[in-house]
Image: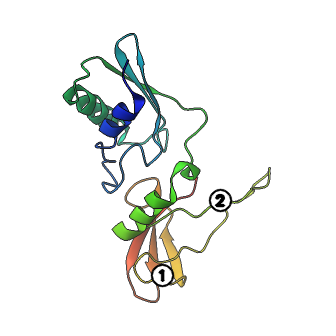
Amino acid sequence: MIANADLLEILRTVKDPEIPVLDVVELGVVRDVREESGKVVVEITPTYSGCPALQMMEDEIIAALKAGGFPDVEVRKVYSPAWTTDWMSAESKAKLKAYGVAPPHVREAEPLIVLERARHTVACPYCGSSNTEEKSEFGSTACKSINFCNSCHQPFDSFKSI
């Protein structure tokens, strides 16, 4: 029997191709890893259903586990429940900030009917100022927006809260 902790340790070596300071475990993409009849099964949930990095993550998960001595690996995509930034730890969010990406805000209970997307003040990851503005809802990836700090005059990505 393979210990899940050993499998998770291998998966922690697989970095998100779009945000290389986070691995797929701390990003919350890996939902489960287990052995089934000698095969390692990894369940993943993409941050977005159309995430362009998903295939690369899947390939790197398989490669890492095979390099770790597990020749039979299957990656299964799980879409329900949908991925949420709530699955990211405070440590992961701190790594994003140190990397220059504003981390997602803590989501509060939302009303049942939302007529428009709530806008939250995003603190600049460089100077901490809240005097920022969103320049584009879509940044370098679909999960980030482009923002600008009016205090230190730095552009920066902000990881969207989902």
| Pointer 2 local density, CA inside 10 Å: few below 14, some 14–19, many at least 20 | few
- The residue under the point 53% across, 62% down is 104
Callout 2 touching callout 1 (CB < 8 Å): no
Mark 2 residue type:
Arg
- The residue under the point 52% across, 78% down is 133
Please state, as top left, top right, bottom left or bottom right, where the N terminus lies in the image. Answer: top left
Q: Quadrant of residue 9?
A: top left
Q: CA distance from mark 2 to mark 1?
A: 19 Å
Where does label 1 land, which residue?
128
Where does label 2 land, which residue?
107
Q: Could you say whether the residue bearing mark 2 is in a helix, strand or loop? A: loop
| Pointer 1 local density, CA inside 10 Å: few below 14, some 14–19, many at least 20 | some
Vertical arrangement, residue 113 with respect to residue 90, above or below: above
Q: Quadrant of residue 56?
A: top left
- The residue under the point 36% across, 22% down is 2
**Residue 100, can we see it?**
no
Residue at far top of view: 37
Q: Could you say whether the residue bearing mark 1 is in a helix, strand or loop? A: loop
Nearest the camera: 17 or 63?
Answer: 63
